[in-house]
Amino acid sequence: MVRSAEDRMTWVCTREPPTARLRLADPPSSRAMLDGGWWPTSRDPVVELCSLVTALTAQRGCVIERIMLQPAAWDRHPRRIGVGGGVVRVGWFTTLEAGLVIITGRRDLRIDLAVIAPETTYAAATATMLAASRSANTTRATDILSIPPSPRSRPLARHGDDVAAWETEGGHLQSDRHPTAPART
């Protein structure tokens, strides 16, 4: 596989990243589906992930090595980010829920966070972060509130996309419908 120069490049945040809007379960629970909630200020992964890694390192004293995200929810897709003199690898998985970020690191570290859309209101984001940070919660990220795909990164729908799934779920294509005359009264 030939990798581009951009894939090999380590992205570094050139300005002071904002303070991460993050709420973690305290104490962490091995039974919880989520370890907390994260409310990024933008859809720029370099700035937001630098902020998140810095906050997690300060709060939990952990060494973060990898972050997994869903690509449709972000403006660009860097593979490596430089943070605090180290490099964090970023994996982009279309099968991952858009409202979830998975962080892994040394000593079997795994942190699953619900991601709240940057444009979410303060009240809704606060409620979501509280729900996601409850100890031993059993709620999935998509059931709380997920980050919708960015309009710029959403692929254009083509005729035939998901037609088989649509037809087996009881839906009908528009071209299959016959126009009906309005009922006379």
Image (spheres, rainbow, N blue to C red):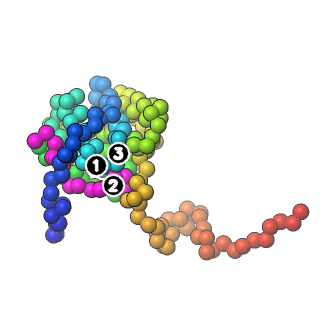
Residue 57 x/y as whole percent: 19, 33
Decide: is 137 above or below 81: above
Q: Amino acid at mark 2?
A: Asp
Label 3: element kind: loop
Label 2: element kind: loop
Whole-angstrom CA distance, mark 2 to mark 1, is 7 Å
Magenta highlight range: 72-85
Residue 140 x/y as whole percent: 41, 41
Residue 15 x/y as whole percent: 21, 42
Q: Amino acid at mark 3?
A: Ser
Label 1: element kind: helix
Is residue 107 shown to the viewer in this render? yes
Per the image, the residue denoted by label 2 is 75
Point out the tag, 2 or 1, that comes first from the N-terminus: 1
Dots 2, 1 in contact, CB < 8 A: yes
Q: Amino acid at mark 1?
A: Pro
Point out the tag, 2 or 3, that comes first from the N-terminus: 3
- In the image as oriented, which residue stretches furthest toward the left? 85
Numbered mark located on residue 42 in the image: 3
Whole-angstrom CA distance, mark 3 to mark 1, is 8 Å
Point 34% across, 48% down: residue: 43
Res. 58 image quadrant: top left
Whole-angstrom CA distance, mark 2 to mark 3, is 9 Å
Left of 41 or right of it: where is 103? left
Left of 91 or right of it: where is 130? right
Res. 48 image quadrant: top left
